[in-house]
Amino acid sequence: MAENVVTIVGAGLAGCEAAHFLAKHGIRVRLADIKPKKFTPAHSSEKLAELVCSNSLKSNDVFGNACGLLKEEMRKLGSLVIAAADATRVPAGGALAVDREAFSAYITDAIAQNENIEYVCEEAERIPAGYAIVATGPLTQGALAEDIQKRLGGNLAFYDAAAPIVSAQSIDYAHTFVADRYGKGSGDYVNCPLTREEYEAFVEALTAAERAEQHAFDKRDVFEGCMPVEIMASRGKDTLRFGMLKPVGLYDENGRRPYAVLQLRKENLAGTAYNLVGFQTNLKFSEQKRVFSMIPALKNAEFLRYGVMHRNTFLNGPQVLGPDSSLKEDGKVFFAGQITGVEGYVESAASGLLAAIACALKLRGEQPIVWDARTVCGALLRHISAPNEDFQPMNANYGVLEPLPEHVRDKALKKKMLAERSLARIGEIAAELEEKLRA
């Protein structure tokens, strides 16, 4: 492979983000993926950058949510993924939800139309030589996984879960009300209330339901942010009422707050399908139909997709990755996406963008960007590379950011100040990149 061509393995969010950034700056890319000849257990579309659910990109609140702040950082750095999300978004209150098909089509077209990107359908069997970015995602398997394990070791695994989707026409709207929590939004959620008796019967059935078999499954390895609803329910009968079924901030048309409530969110722009918010599950499909249909609004529900769980693999980044996400043993090979130990679609895409930035600068002979934890991007890079004896995947959150120099008691003001500091630094970095990578 020519020295001035970067090989990218994996055309998910991280890989496409990386390919687009490099190509936009005049660097030729060879983007390799197994699609359309093969698919991972979590994917079914031939398009690139496939999402599992519509609200995968979470909050869009720049000044009140760390993931919203991360999105704005990425916008300022020229992110393809965030541009695609903004162009294909569907109503979801303060969240950035998208039409999944339109989102993937947008990114697929952007990759196909860029003359600096060569897309090839092939399955990588080893870490590429020369400049490369490995972005094969949390389902990396086969010969490549064996090569990574052999060369780097330290691989860990956990399990991720996806929520079911039901047909909009099959919902019994007589047992629902439309409202957004605390009135924030424009009526983007359909709420399915439960009485105390209905809730307790549901929890009892849920905890006793039969789960799908998982090979070598150990529930201690389940990432807390993707905990299956049945495991949450087993922690106590009121756990769900303080979690995904919490009624706080929701009132029906008569001003009454339900005992518990399941929220449904549009899965697509047409509103023909709804996602069961927070109902990631590992129940057998027949059990999902039986148990979830106990919720009055879903008694006749048609399930367009049942919830699934799949294996996620990630590196022990602090042992093998440098501060720019390149291998300590080979500074030309970068890793990006969830395989690095970031958790979430936005975080994965950001990882691809950061790997591409570092790769471009190194290839051009420029000095690297000095990232620090004043930005979410920098904090995530630090998380996957800084010494950590108990390394685990991490979402974007305020806890990874460098604290403000002064103590601020007001939480909203504190978040606003963190965001302002972050965006000021990102503005400086964006200007620095423009100067360094100007063709």
Image (tube, helix red, strand yellow):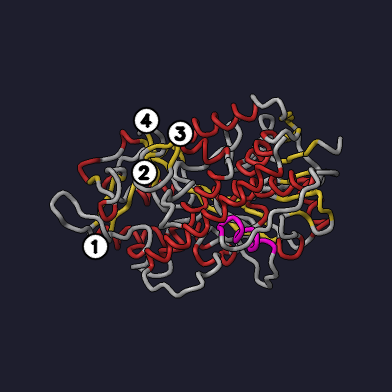
Residue located 81% across and 53% down the image: 331
| Residue type, label 4 | Ala
For disc 1, the marked residue is: 196
- Quadrant where the C terminus is found in the figure: top right
For disc 3, the marked residue is: 88
Res. 27 image quadrant: top right
User: How far is the residue under mark 2 from the one under mark 4?
Assistant: 13 Å
Q: Which mark is residue 92?
A: 2
- Judged by depth in the image, the label closer to the viewer, 2 or 4, is 2
| Residue type, label 2 | Ala
Q: Which mark is residue 154?
A: none
For disc 4, the marked residue is: 270
Say which of 125 and 8 sits in front: 8
Q: Which element is circle 4 on?
A: loop
- Quadrant where the N terminus is found in the figure: top right
User: How far is the residue under mark 1 from the one under mark 3?
Assistant: 39 Å
| Residue type, label 3 | Thr
- Judged by depth in the image, the label closer to the viewer, 1 or 3, is 3
Res. 157 image quadrant: bottom right
Is 383 colored magenta in this rendering?
yes
Q: Which residues are magenta?
A: 375-385
